[in-house]
Image (tube, grey):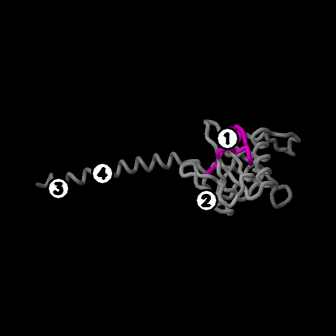
Amino acid sequence: MALLKSGWLWRQTAILKRWKLNWCDLWIDGSLCFYKTDNRRELEQRIGLKTTCIDVHSGLECGGVSPPEINPRENLITVHLRGGSTLNLCANSEDESLAWKLTLLETRRSPVFTYDPYDDSYQAIPLNGYHTVYITPGAGPGTHQVVVQRDPFDGVAESIAMGLLAGMAAGAAMRSFLWMPFFFC
Protein backbone atom coordinates (compact mmCIF):
# COMPACT_ATOMS: atom_id res chain seq x y z
CA MET A 1 0.00 0.00 0.00
CA ALA A 2 1.34 3.41 -0.92
CA LEU A 3 1.95 6.25 1.49
CA LEU A 4 0.54 9.57 0.25
CA LYS A 5 1.73 11.94 2.97
CA SER A 6 3.38 11.69 6.36
CA GLY A 7 4.74 14.05 8.96
CA TRP A 8 4.31 15.59 12.38
CA LEU A 9 0.90 17.10 13.19
CA TRP A 10 -0.63 18.40 16.39
CA ARG A 11 -3.88 16.53 17.21
CA GLN A 12 -6.47 17.71 19.71
CA THR A 13 -7.73 14.98 22.04
CA ALA A 14 -11.47 14.37 22.10
CA ILE A 15 -12.13 14.48 25.85
CA LEU A 16 -9.66 16.88 27.48
CA LYS A 17 -9.12 19.01 24.33
CA ARG A 18 -5.34 18.97 24.85
CA TRP A 19 -2.96 19.17 21.91
CA LYS A 20 -0.59 16.20 21.32
CA LEU A 21 2.18 15.98 18.75
CA ASN A 22 1.76 12.81 16.65
CA TRP A 23 3.42 11.32 13.60
CA CYS A 24 0.71 10.99 10.94
CA ASP A 25 0.56 8.74 7.89
CA LEU A 26 -2.05 9.11 5.17
CA TRP A 27 -2.29 5.92 3.11
CA ILE A 28 -3.65 5.51 -0.40
CA ASP A 29 -6.68 3.57 0.88
CA GLY A 30 -7.77 6.62 2.91
CA SER A 31 -6.44 5.48 6.30
CA LEU A 32 -5.15 8.33 8.45
CA CYS A 33 -2.95 6.78 11.15
CA PHE A 34 -1.58 8.50 14.25
CA TYR A 35 1.56 7.21 15.98
CA LYS A 36 3.42 8.32 19.11
CA THR A 37 6.76 8.47 17.26
CA ASP A 38 7.99 8.44 13.68
CA ASN A 39 9.14 4.80 13.94
CA ARG A 40 5.44 3.77 13.55
CA ARG A 41 5.53 1.12 16.29
CA GLU A 42 2.73 2.39 18.55
CA LEU A 43 -0.47 3.06 16.61
CA GLU A 44 -2.72 5.38 18.61
CA GLN A 45 -5.63 5.81 16.22
CA ARG A 46 -6.68 5.00 12.67
CA ILE A 47 -9.46 6.79 10.80
CA GLY A 48 -10.83 5.59 7.45
CA LEU A 49 -11.40 8.83 5.56
CA LYS A 50 -12.95 7.25 2.46
CA THR A 51 -16.05 6.29 4.45
CA THR A 52 -16.14 8.81 7.31
CA CYS A 53 -14.82 12.16 6.02
CA ILE A 54 -17.41 14.76 5.00
CA ASP A 55 -15.28 17.89 4.54
CA VAL A 56 -11.90 19.43 5.41
CA HIS A 57 -11.31 23.06 6.45
CA SER A 58 -8.07 24.87 7.14
CA GLY A 59 -6.83 28.15 8.58
CA LEU A 60 -9.45 30.78 9.28
CA GLU A 61 -12.24 28.40 8.13
CA CYS A 62 -11.79 26.50 11.41
CA GLY A 63 -14.15 28.51 13.60
CA GLY A 64 -14.29 27.80 17.32
CA VAL A 65 -10.96 25.97 17.47
CA SER A 66 -7.96 27.42 19.26
CA PRO A 67 -4.55 26.24 18.00
CA PRO A 68 -1.72 25.14 20.30
CA GLU A 69 -0.06 28.17 21.89
CA ILE A 70 3.04 27.99 19.66
CA ASN A 71 1.14 27.93 16.33
CA PRO A 72 -0.97 30.60 14.60
CA ARG A 73 -4.59 30.04 13.55
CA GLU A 74 -3.56 29.72 9.87
CA ASN A 75 -1.98 26.30 10.61
CA LEU A 76 -5.26 24.68 11.75
CA ILE A 77 -6.95 21.79 9.88
CA THR A 78 -10.44 20.56 10.80
CA VAL A 79 -11.69 17.25 9.40
CA HIS A 80 -15.48 16.90 9.67
CA LEU A 81 -16.51 13.26 10.14
CA ARG A 82 -19.83 11.44 9.90
CA GLY A 83 -21.89 11.54 13.07
CA GLY A 84 -21.08 15.19 13.72
CA SER A 85 -17.62 14.66 15.20
CA THR A 86 -14.56 16.60 14.13
CA LEU A 87 -10.84 15.91 14.10
CA ASN A 88 -8.77 19.01 14.88
CA LEU A 89 -5.20 19.04 13.59
CA CYS A 90 -2.50 21.70 13.43
CA ALA A 91 0.52 21.76 11.12
CA ASN A 92 3.82 23.54 11.76
CA SER A 93 3.36 26.02 8.87
CA GLU A 94 0.60 27.46 6.72
CA ASP A 95 2.01 25.82 3.57
CA GLU A 96 2.12 22.44 5.28
CA SER A 97 -1.46 22.94 6.48
CA LEU A 98 -2.64 23.65 2.94
CA ALA A 99 -0.75 20.62 1.58
CA TRP A 100 -2.39 18.36 4.20
CA LYS A 101 -5.82 19.82 3.42
CA LEU A 102 -5.48 19.22 -0.33
CA THR A 103 -4.18 15.67 0.18
CA LEU A 104 -6.98 14.85 2.64
CA LEU A 105 -9.63 16.19 0.24
CA GLU A 106 -8.16 14.31 -2.71
CA THR A 107 -8.01 11.07 -0.71
CA ARG A 108 -11.63 11.45 0.30
CA ARG A 109 -12.93 12.10 -3.21
CA SER A 110 -11.07 10.03 -5.74
CA PRO A 111 -11.12 6.28 -6.19
CA VAL A 112 -7.68 4.72 -6.22
CA PHE A 113 -6.54 2.41 -9.01
CA THR A 114 -3.42 0.29 -9.30
CA TYR A 115 -1.85 -0.97 -12.51
CA ASP A 116 -1.50 -4.73 -12.96
CA PRO A 117 1.25 -5.35 -15.55
CA TYR A 118 0.33 -9.05 -15.91
CA ASP A 119 -3.19 -8.26 -17.18
CA ASP A 120 -2.30 -4.82 -18.59
CA SER A 121 -5.24 -3.37 -16.67
CA TYR A 122 -6.09 -1.07 -13.77
CA GLN A 123 -7.81 -2.39 -10.64
CA ALA A 124 -9.58 -0.37 -7.96
CA ILE A 125 -8.24 -0.62 -4.42
CA PRO A 126 -11.05 -1.58 -2.02
CA LEU A 127 -12.25 0.93 0.59
CA ASN A 128 -10.65 -1.21 3.27
CA GLY A 129 -7.14 -1.84 1.96
CA TYR A 130 -6.47 -4.37 4.69
CA HIS A 131 -7.01 -8.06 3.96
CA THR A 132 -5.70 -7.32 0.46
CA VAL A 133 -2.95 -9.22 -1.31
CA TYR A 134 -0.35 -7.29 -3.31
CA ILE A 135 2.17 -8.99 -5.57
CA THR A 136 5.45 -7.15 -5.99
CA PRO A 137 8.60 -8.10 -7.92
CA GLY A 138 11.03 -10.17 -5.88
CA ALA A 139 14.80 -9.93 -5.53
CA GLY A 140 15.69 -12.24 -8.41
CA PRO A 141 14.43 -12.40 -11.97
CA GLY A 142 11.11 -14.21 -12.32
CA THR A 143 10.43 -14.15 -8.57
CA HIS A 144 7.61 -12.32 -6.85
CA GLN A 145 6.91 -11.31 -3.30
CA VAL A 146 3.38 -11.61 -1.91
CA VAL A 147 2.41 -8.98 0.65
CA VAL A 148 -0.78 -9.40 2.69
CA GLN A 149 -2.02 -6.29 4.49
CA ARG A 150 -3.83 -7.07 7.74
CA ASP A 151 -5.74 -4.75 9.99
CA PRO A 152 -3.70 -4.11 13.18
CA PHE A 153 -6.90 -4.23 15.23
CA ASP A 154 -7.94 -7.68 13.94
CA GLY A 155 -8.72 -10.09 16.73
CA VAL A 156 -9.04 -7.46 19.48
CA ALA A 157 -12.72 -8.26 20.14
CA GLU A 158 -12.01 -12.01 20.20
CA SER A 159 -9.17 -11.50 22.68
CA ILE A 160 -11.40 -9.46 24.97
CA ALA A 161 -14.17 -12.07 24.78
CA MET A 162 -11.76 -14.90 25.62
CA GLY A 163 -10.34 -12.89 28.52
CA LEU A 164 -13.81 -12.29 29.93
CA LEU A 165 -14.69 -15.98 29.56
CA ALA A 166 -11.45 -17.04 31.29
CA GLY A 167 -12.11 -14.54 34.08
CA MET A 168 -15.62 -15.88 34.67
CA ALA A 169 -14.33 -19.47 34.75
CA ALA A 170 -11.60 -18.53 37.23
CA GLY A 171 -14.15 -16.68 39.37
CA ALA A 172 -16.47 -19.71 39.44
CA ALA A 173 -13.58 -21.97 40.46
CA MET A 174 -12.50 -19.59 43.23
CA ARG A 175 -16.05 -19.33 44.52
CA SER A 176 -16.26 -23.12 44.88
CA PHE A 177 -13.03 -23.11 46.94
CA LEU A 178 -14.53 -20.57 49.34
CA TRP A 179 -17.29 -23.04 50.30
CA MET A 180 -14.80 -25.84 51.09
CA PRO A 181 -14.24 -24.93 54.81
CA PHE A 182 -17.99 -25.23 55.49
CA PHE A 183 -18.08 -28.82 54.20
CA PHE A 184 -15.42 -29.95 56.68
CA CYS A 185 -17.15 -28.48 59.74
CA–CA distance between discs 2 and 1? Answer: 25 Å
Q: Nearer the viewer, mark 1 or mark 3?
A: 1
Q: Residue at x 75, y 50 (%)?
A: 1
User: Contact (CB < 8 A) between labels 2 and 3?
Assistant: no
Q: Nearer the viewer, residue 175 or 105?
A: 105
Q: Is residue 180 left or right of residue 70?
A: left
Q: Is residue 2 visible?
A: no
Mark 4 or mark 1, earlier in chain: 1
Q: Residue furthest left?
A: 185
- Looking at numbered disc 3 in the image, what kind of residue is underneath it? Pro
Classify 10 Å Cα crowding around label 1: few (below 14), some (14-19), many (20 and above).
Answer: some
Q: Name the kind of residue labelled 2 in the image.
A: Glu
The stretch in magenta equals 45-64
Q: Position of residue 124 (x, y in %)?
A: 79, 39
Residue at figure coordinates x 65%, y 51% from the top left? 66
Of the residues shown, which amino acid type is indicated by label 4?
Answer: Ala
Q: Which residue is mark 2?
A: 42
- Which residue is labeled 4 in the image? 173
Task: Decide if residue 150 is on the left or right side of residue 171.
Answer: right
Q: Can residue 5 be seen from the camera position used here?
A: yes
Query: Label 4 to label 2, Cα distance in Å?
Result: 37 Å
> Can you tell which of label 2 and label 3 is closer to the viewer?
2
Q: Disc 1 vs disc 3: Cβ atoms closer than 8 Å?
A: no
| Residue with the mark numbered 1 | 80
Mark 4 element type: helix
Question: Few, some or many C-alpha atoms within 10 Å of disc 3 (few <14, some 14-19, many ≥20)?
Answer: few
> CB of mark 2 within 8 Å of CB of mark 1?
no
**Tag 3 or tag 1, which sits nearer the N-term?**
1
Front label number (4 vs 1): 1
Element at label 1: strand
